[in-house]
Amino acid sequence: MLNKILIIIPAYNHSNSLRDVVSRALKVHPAVMVVDDGSSENVVDILSGLNVPVVSHPENLGKGSAILTGAREALKRGMTHIVTIDADGQHDPFDFKRFIPVLMEDPHAIIVGRRNFQNFKRANIPGSAVFGRSFSNFWLRVQTGQTLGDTQSGFRIYPLFVIERLKLRERRYSFEIEILVKAAWAGIRLREVDISVYYPPADKRISHFHLFKDNVRISLLNTRLTMRSILPWPHHKIEGLNDRTSEKITMVHPMRSIKTLLAENISPKQLAAAGSLGVFLGTLPLIACHTIVILFAANFYRLNRVVSLSASQLCMPPLVPALCIETGYFLRHGGFLTEISMQTLGYQALERFYEWLIGSLIFAPVFAALVGSTIYITAFFMKRAAQARDKKRVFFGSPSDEKIREYEN
């Protein structure tokens, strides 16, 4: 596999560090390519004597464009993966060895190098980089439900089939955020390894990150991705990675839905948590925004959105809101509301809403726990029954001693 990997180093006016970075990269891997993104310097002269191909853009098109150019060249050479390393010297190419065990274990994953930001003040690491990383990590969690420690690191391994199959719009620094989010949506695992980092003193540091322009691009991208993440229709999936069924998930057929979800390797605990979340939020008086809040929360907590939305349908009017209002009314007045009139439901609507809120704070956790427990118990026993059937199938298919022992256990 290692002979199918090409190291790509995007460069834009990095004359002070480029040759050193390329030289060190060649010591750890023989296949290295530089993509000159419209530098005013002569990159070929800078790298003279090094056995490294250089692909040049006629003008500066952005880091994302440079990575895509490198990916196309890698495909022409029959490669399966590319490694991206920044040309400014902040990454140590020798850390490439840390990626290899994860790559061998999970060749379809995008692997990101998590830079060591401990003692960042002593290491000349700018505070803006620390804040930017935390900010970007947060939005990845919101948009995908997945967690990474350094979403802004440029030291990565990409499977080329992922870049081929995703529709990517960004071409500058924001590309590295977009590809992580869309890859996660497509079913690609995001992995990480710890790497070192070097930042020179501020007066010697070269950065082409435009504080205003690139931050605006990233903010607009995060807005677009966040809005897309909470929409109810499914994301584009890369075929062949998941054998996901097209069975519809609905509370009308709960047993069939649970069986379908268990077949997708969702555990009973995850099903119960997703159902509890949907019921809890569905009970609250979040008028006209239940769906958005549930989708957002399910994304954030990495729970199945379809299960959460389906379970929330149990809270549809009139039963659950009426129970909450009665509970709130009882807590306020010591008795139950028995009169249904324009006075009680029309003119006193704000009071009823307040009672709905009070009652839901009591009823929501109880109802969520009840539904979650029911889902968990049902899914647990259905999963055990399925496992028992599988063992019987193994036993009766070929009754070797080993399989008999497995069946008896």
Image: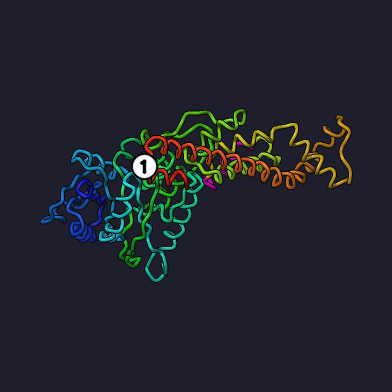
| Residue plotted at (30% across, 43% down) | 159
Q: Measured from the top left, where is residue 407 in percent x and y?
A: 45, 43
Judge whether 133 appears above or below 336 on screen. Answer: below
Where is mark 1, residue-wise?
400
What amino acid is found at the position of numbered circle 1 in the picture? Answer: Ser
| Coloration mode | rainbow
Q: Residues within 10 Å of mark 1 (few under 14, many from 20)?
A: few
| Residue plotted at (15% across, 51% down) | 52
Query: Position of 346 compared to 235: left or right?
Result: right
| Residue plotted at (26% across, 59% down) | 93
> For the magenta stretch, what is the residue range?
290-302
Residue 293 visible in the picture: no
- Which one is nearer the viewer's eye here, 47 or 134? 134
What is the quadrant of residue 20 in the picture?
A: bottom left
What is the quadrant of residue 129 in the picture?
A: bottom left
Query: Position of 341 compared to 24: left or right?
Result: right
| Magenta stretch secondary structure, dominant | helix
- Magenta segment includes 297: yes
Query: Position of 388 compared to 188: left or right?
Result: right
| Residue plotted at (33% across, 44% down) | 108
